[in-house]
Amino acid sequence: MINYQKKKQRRLNNYLSSLLELQKEKRYLLKIRKLIIEKDYKPDNLFVKKVLSKISALENEEIITVSFNNLLYDLFKKVAITGGAAIVLLMIITCFSQGSLNPFSFLNTSGIFQEPDFLSCALLNF
Amino acid sequence: VEEYLDTNEIELVKLAKAGNKLALASLILQHEEQVVKTITGMLGKCPEADDISQETFVRFYQSLDDFKCKSGVGTYITRIAINLSLNEIKKRKRNDKFFSINSDNNILQIPDTNLSQHLENDNLKEIVNKAVQFLEPKYRIVIVLKLIDGYSTKEISEILNIRKSSVLTRLSRAQEKLRNRLKFYKEGLL
């Protein structure tokens, strides 16, 4: 493989030395390459500081976001527990006062819907 | 930072993962020039290039946990830099379309004044680099990685996740395109 590469390189070198046009072409490409490489690409002196401050800002932002989310979660938990407790209490009171946990018991409307005449009247009017 | 200058990259990455800011600063110091080169090569000298160079390291820091040290840190960071540059190029294209700005994409301006005046080295450098900026992103990437960053064909194929033969084809086409764009300056370049 290495021999093949060497042979290939030698053949290319022979072509190159015999053809002026190719030599010109090579010079041209090398000059372009050189000009591209030569350009200054110097980073800013404060580059590292800037990056680190960006990272710190991002971390602070993350901390604020996380603490805000935790706060929101805590608030939600408190409201949910209070609400849940209120619902359970309401159910117990309803169960004791109405003697049932039927949904109509909460609205105190059980009498109306159990009347067969009311239903038929409603259906006829519809 | 100086105390970490002799520490190897993998060790630095481990320390940075553990939250050591000095190790991170050392990694940034080692790779800042490379990243600035890549991004300036891709986007040209512009204010966005600075921001994107910084953003590259921020992204690197954010993805430290995903970095498994399979490729070198330089390769990994260059991949981020290339992706961010491509995003910026897409953004520019979108903005150009939206605001109907004529970006002269296909014409390299030929100066009206005496040509010899423009053939000094500095001017030629500008002209050649401008010609690089006019290349399509897929050709520009290989030129930047090969000529500016000095990566080998194998490394470029790893960074871009393409075959070595594709890298060579793109490189050859990119050179051909550059030659066409710079034909008016050929005398100065010989």
Image: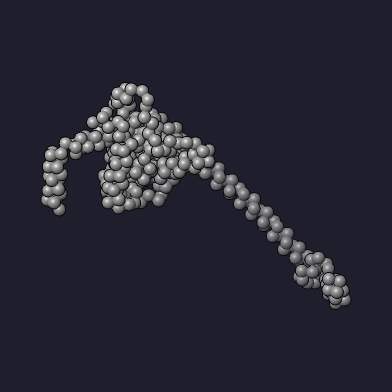
Give the residue at x 35% y 35%: B131
Residue B18 location (% of width, % of height):
40, 45
**Snapshot quadrant of residue B35:** top left
**Along the horizontal axis of the image, is B176 left or right of A104?**
left
Residue A33 location (% of width, % of height):
27, 35
Residue A98 location (% of width, % of height):
81, 69
In the picture, which quadrant includes the C terminus of chain A?
bottom right
Give the residue at x 83% y 67%: A108
Q: In the image, is residue A102 above or below residue B68?
A: below
Give the residue at x 27% y 51%: B165
**Snapshot quadrant of residue B59:** top left
**Along the horizontal axis of the image, is A122 left or right of B3?**
right
| Coloration mode | one colour
The answer, for residue B190, to whether it is visible in the render is yes
**Along the horizontal axis of the image, is A76 left or right of A54?**
right
Farthest bottom residue?
Answer: A116
**Snapshot quadrant of residue B46:** top left
A93 or A47, which lies in front? Answer: A47
Q: In the image, is residue B120 above or below residue A112?
A: above
The answer, for residue B39, to whether it is visible in the render is no
Give the residue at x 45% y 43%: B90
A41 or B182, which lies in front? Answer: B182
